[in-house]
Each structure stands twice: as structure tokens, then as C-alpha cells.
Image: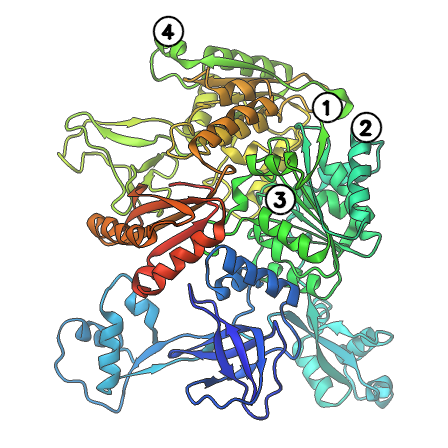
Amino acid sequence: MSLVRVAVPVPALDALTYRVPDGFQTPMLGARVLVPVGKRVMTGIVVELNGGDQEVPALKDLIDVLDPDAFLEPAVVTLALWVAEYYASGPGEALAAAMPPRAWIESERYAQINPDVAVGAERGIRREILERLSAGKPVRVDALAKGRSGVHAALLTLERDGLIVITQPLKGSADAHRSVRTVHLSPQGHDADATGRLGPRQTAALDALRGLPDGIDASELGTRGISSQTIARLTASGFVTIGKRRVDRDPFAANNAVGLADKGAGKAGPYQLTDEQHCAFERLRTLAAHNRFSAALLHGVTGSGKTEVYLRLAQEVSGRGLGVLILVPEIALTPAVAATFRAAFADRVAIQHSGLSDGERHDQWQRIRRGEIDVVVGTRSAVFAPLRRLGLIVVDEEHDGSYKQEESPRYHARDVAVVRARAAGALAVVGSATPSLESYQNALSGRYELVTLRKRILDRPLASARVIDMRDVYAAEGPDVILSPALRDALGHRLERGEQSIVLLNRRGFATMVFCRQCGSTTECPNCSVTLTVHRVQRRVRCHYCNYSVAIPKACANCAGPYLEQMGFGTERVEAEVLAHFPHARVARVDRDTIRRRGAISALLTRFASGALDVLVGTQMIAKGHDFPRVSLVGVISADVGLGLADFRAAERTFQLLTQVAGRAGRGDILGEAIIQTLHPNHYSIVHATSQNYEAFFGEESRYRQAMRYPPAVALLNAVVRARTHQQAMEEAGDLVRALRWGGEPYKVLGPAPAPLSRLRGEHRAQFFMKGASRTPMRRALLKVLESRPELKRRTTIDVDPMSML
């Protein structure tokens, strides 16, 4: 009897050892298996083959082996296990990030009243549960327990007393492909019409099937007026047979799911590379031809043609029979890039992002796994795509924070991509107009090859920039001004000339808070330590962290006074202001509120690209990766909105956002202009963004990071302890800090202190930081301390290389 180690998707749980029962073939590394975990049945991934015939009575047996071969490529399993170790998560959590949708089978617990036992008088929660089960139908345990404490304990006692029955049916299937019924002509069916006994519908069905060895879909026969009853009679007579055919769900075929397809296709035709592009391409092609790992940073100004270099490089690598992976940070960017690559590679391109349906993502993933794909374009999780013989990984807009996952496993896709390229002996190219300090430091130190594009295509000039000091505007026009006179005039001129404009504010909603003039209180989230944001279109105030919402209040909840004012503003208010000043302008807004519906972002950007809109108002979604030749003006509202955050990356993010959005202007034949409104016109991030001088910003920001000992000068780990009360969170975080400070440790511990978001989703939060030259001793020390307190371990978030300090 052999043993296997299996990882299951349970937070912070290590791989478990199981026995392979007699009669079972030992599963392969990366295969899915069904295993018992406590009282549940779950799908796990085999991560280690221990072998041997050891008899260990305490071990449990596998329930089933779902795959005869590896479901996950061994290379992907190895990568996921590295992610689990580096980012201090459970191996099952990391492997879950690599799995496609609909790949899991697990048990769901249902409770049902026992019809054979008489129910006596019950009290409290036991009575409530029995009343909910009184209809006699099974009810999911999760539904019974939602929003209530003590339900699970009460269910255990009710089951022990025989009053209820708990069942655990399995949910899901090993094969989630979609199939359709097909009708095939049998050998007897070829001569069936000679009998003269068939009706006209049956004869028509047989005529349609002749000469089609693969048969016809039953639904297609239905459109020809041949009913299912006719097919059933032919089947009973032996004239036709019924089969099934697998059908892949195609995201490219559904309602312009690619989005901007015409725009991308228009770019696909070959054109002459500029001298800079040609030099960059040749340097990267040489690195790729070595067939060994190398990494490069492609630092190109906005509009310099980085995507075309990626495309030529992908064609070169795929021409040698190697796979190509293209990562983009936002779903909004995926359609245009996918369209460009699909125009070049046709149906050998797959896309992977959460904007697809589960079925589409599953089928795209399976096509990659079967080796039918040369190029994969996707967002963060696509770094685990099962491409074989990988030759090139491109991380576009590598600086973007969207590459960092904020739930466990808290991996950064850019860094994972470099690790995967190293393991595969492939070339990793990270590209940006505003590289992260970490990547640029790697380039300067020689870890990455630095490849630079300093000029735009056709030598077009970068957009000129004007900084508007809003202190002067407020002094002249009052504190409620949103569009400065300069920006209003510039928008008017563009509308008169038929040109397009983009207006950015990286904050959604209509107003940032509701304030009572009588008692001074604000409308706050009951679950999080933030004020509720006004969304006027929805007529609600909402928390952007836990999504709690209520109707816009008409009276103060604290003093019942009617003197409520809305303060601050977001993109919804900016859109209203633009329309108030320019009623005939065609204005649209891009933020999370307007793109919830599937395909909405693609449809909206397509309208803007076609010239059907004059002004696009939005958050950071519109700041990067888009190429709209008619845009000649970019306006930035509250450019310093991010500088007040308690985050050492605040200046870097501000510089990147302003530089990127300014780069949307002047990409065609019309000169571009950026107008930046700020209260801090002399802040170095704004000054250097105005001149788009990355090197100057990098030098100044690096000196600050070195002085304060922040990344990339040191490695950083952020730990957040969650608890029911503020006191408990601070005390438990303090316990961890004291245990970590044993004297002589090769790191520093800072804190604990209340987290900037001291309460989030109903939990109080305290945090501390660990700084050091190496991540490994910090990670191991913290995990060792937490091992002795498993209950606290479940409430402690470990973030290695954090991108957010909140």
C-alpha cells in the first residue's frame, strides 16, 4: 500500500498524507483525488509520491482518483508550491489559484429533520433550527448558519440526539466540458428509405444525415423542422444512433467579448519598426534565442510601441515551437491586447481572466492544457496557465498593483512570472513606462537587461503638461470648484474642434461622506472604520470595502437633525460637473459602478474608440494601456488624492498614475495636453510626472527609501492580527512581536500599532512590520511563533512584499 501527499484548498493547512487503497492505481503527481478532510469530502492535488508499503493505522484512504494522468502540469505544481512557501500560505490555497473553474468536487452538508423521531419541546436556537427544517426538505448547513453564531454546535447536538440527519452529497463532476447531442446515420439507415415505410419527416432526417460521417447536432435538426420524436422513432428502428460531441465555449464569439476587435485587428498588419523598436526587438530576440533563462526590463515611454515589440517577439518564439504568456494588469486591458495577438495568431490564442464565464475560462484552460494554444493573454492568475515548453513571458505594465493578489495566497504575478521563466529556461520581459522601483533597481544592478525606448512612434512629442494650483482656484472661486477654469476652457476647445478628452479622478462615487452640520457626525460603515460614499445614481451610501449600503439618509443617525451635507467628490460627481458645463457633450464614466455588467467595459471603450463619445471620465482603469488617437486632452482632478495615504509607496503610485494618464494624450496626429489639478504642485512626484522624467523621480524616491529603510532597500513583511476587539488585536499582536524579538535576530520588528483601516468587515486589526535583508528568516520566525497558537494563526494575515499598508 503506497502513500501520497495531497494538498487541499483549506487555508494554512499543510499537505496531508493518505493511503492508496488496494486495487487503486497510484495517482500521478498533479492528479486530482477525492479525500476525506474531517467530516467533509474534498478534491485535492497530489503533490508528492511517498511510495513504500508502510502500514500507518491513523492514515485515511483515498476515496477516488479523478485523473489517470496529471491534471496540473508538474511544473505548475512546483511553481504553486514555491508560491505557498514564499508567500506563507497553505499549498492547497496556492494550487487553487492554478486551477480552472469547475475543476473541484466536494461535499456539501445538508440538514433534514428525522421523520422517524418525534420532536419534543425545544428552546432557543435548537427550536429555531427545527422550525426552519419543519418542511421536511434538506437545507444547506451554510444557509442555516448564515449570520448566526452557535448554529454548528446546535446542529451537532441535534444530530447526536437523532432529531436531524446530516447528509453530505457530492457537488461537481470530474469533467466539466459542455457536450451536445449528435445524430449519426447507422449502416441500416442507408437503405432505410427502400422499405417505403418511412414518413416524410423521417426521410428528410435520413437525407440530411447522408454524407456526414460526423453526424449533425440534434438542435440543428430541430431548426429544420425535424422533431425529437422523429429522431426517437428512427433511433428505435436502428436507423440512427445518438452520440455526444464536446463543444468548447468560445469567449471570442460572444457579443464582441474580445472588445475593440476592429481596433486590434487594424494594428495587426506588419509595419516598419522604428530604429529604437528594431534595436529593442533584436536585443530581446537574442536573449530569447539562448534557450536559457534571462530577464529584461523594457522601459519605454507611453506611446513608444512596446506592444508591437511584444508581438514580434512572440512570433519569433512561437515560430520555434515554444509557448508565449502575455500578462496584463486589468481585465479592461485584456480585450485590446488579445485582439492584437489574435489577429496575428488566429485561434492559437487563449484568454484567461475573471471577466469570462466559468465555462469559458474552463474551456480556454483545457485548450491550453491540450497543447492547442501558442499564446495566452491574461491577467494575474494566468501566470499559472498550463503552457508547455514555455519560451517567453511578458508582463506588461509591470508596475501595476493589480498584479498583487490581496487574498491568500498573496502572490505578485510579476515576481512569480520571473520564477516560472527561470524554471522553464525562458525569457521574462517586464515592461512599463513607469517601472516599479524594484524592477528598475534590478535593471541597474544587472539582474535584468535594461532595454529602453525613449521616443514615441513617428517621433510624436509627449503631451505638454500644466499644473494648476487649486489653492489659487479655491481662493478665487470658492472651495466647491471641481473643474478649474483652465480645464473647463480646455474641454470647451476640444469639444469645438471635435477632439476627445479624458478626465481622471481615482475615486468613485458622487460624494465621499455625509456630514451633519448640527452635531458634526458623519455616516460611517458599521463594519469598517470608513465613512460611507454617496452614490447618487443608486440613491445609496456604500462602503467600498465590505459593500454595506443603505439609502441616502435624510436625517442624522446621531442627533436626528435634518442638516446633512455631502462633502468630497468622486467620478460620478465629476461626470455631472462636465455635463453641467457642457450639456451637449457625449460623456461616459468608467469605474466599478459602471462596468459591473459583463462586456460593459469593452462596449464602452469601443464606443469611445469609434468617436461616439467626447469625454471619458474614470478612475485609474482609463490611465494605462489604451491607445485612442483622437484624445488630445487629459485632465486630472485631485492629482494628490493618494499622497495622504499611510503608505510608503504613495509618491510612487502618484507619479505612475499621472505619467500613465498623461500618456493617453497626443498619441495620434494631434498634439496632446495634460492639465493636472493639485494642492501640492511642488511635490516631487507631481513635478517629475509633469516632465515625465522617470530617472529623476527614481533618484529622489530611492534616496527616500534608503533613508527610511523601505523596499527595495530592504525586504518587508506585513502581519495583521484580526480580533473581535481593539484591545485583543493589540495584545495578541504584541505577544507575537515579543516572541519575535529574541535578541540577535537578523531583522527588525516595528510595531504593533492599529492598522490604518483599524476595523474591516467587522474585525479590529493591529499590524506590525518585519524588515531585513532576507525574507526567509523573517517568514520562518513568524510561522514558527504562530505554530504554537493555531487559533491566532487563523486570524493573522501574513503579506510578504506587501503592496498596500492599509
Q: Which is closer to the viewer, label 4 or label 1?
A: 1
Q: Distance from label 3 to label 2 (Cα)?
A: 24 Å
Q: Position of residue 785 (x, y in %)?
A: 35, 59
Q: If the image is split into quadrants, where does the N terminus sit?
A: bottom right
Q: Distance from label 1 to label 3 (Cα)?
A: 22 Å
To which residue does mark 2 refer? 274
Tag 1–tag 3 contact (CB < 8 Å): no
Q: Crowdedness of circle 2 by 10 Å Cα count: few (<14), some, many (20+)? A: some
Q: Crowdedness of circle 3 by 10 Å Cα count: few (<14), some, many (20+)? A: many
* Quarter assignment of residue 299: top right
To which residue does mark 3 refer? 328
Q: Earlier in the sequence, mark 4 or mark 1?
A: 1
Residue 674 vertical placement versus 419 (above, below): above
Considering every residue shown, the one lying at the far top of the view is 476
To which residue does mark 4 refer? 476
Residue 636: mark = none
Tag 1–tag 2 contact (CB < 8 Å): yes
Residue 459 vertical placement versus 423 (above, below): above
Q: Distance from label 3 to label 4 (Cα)?
A: 43 Å
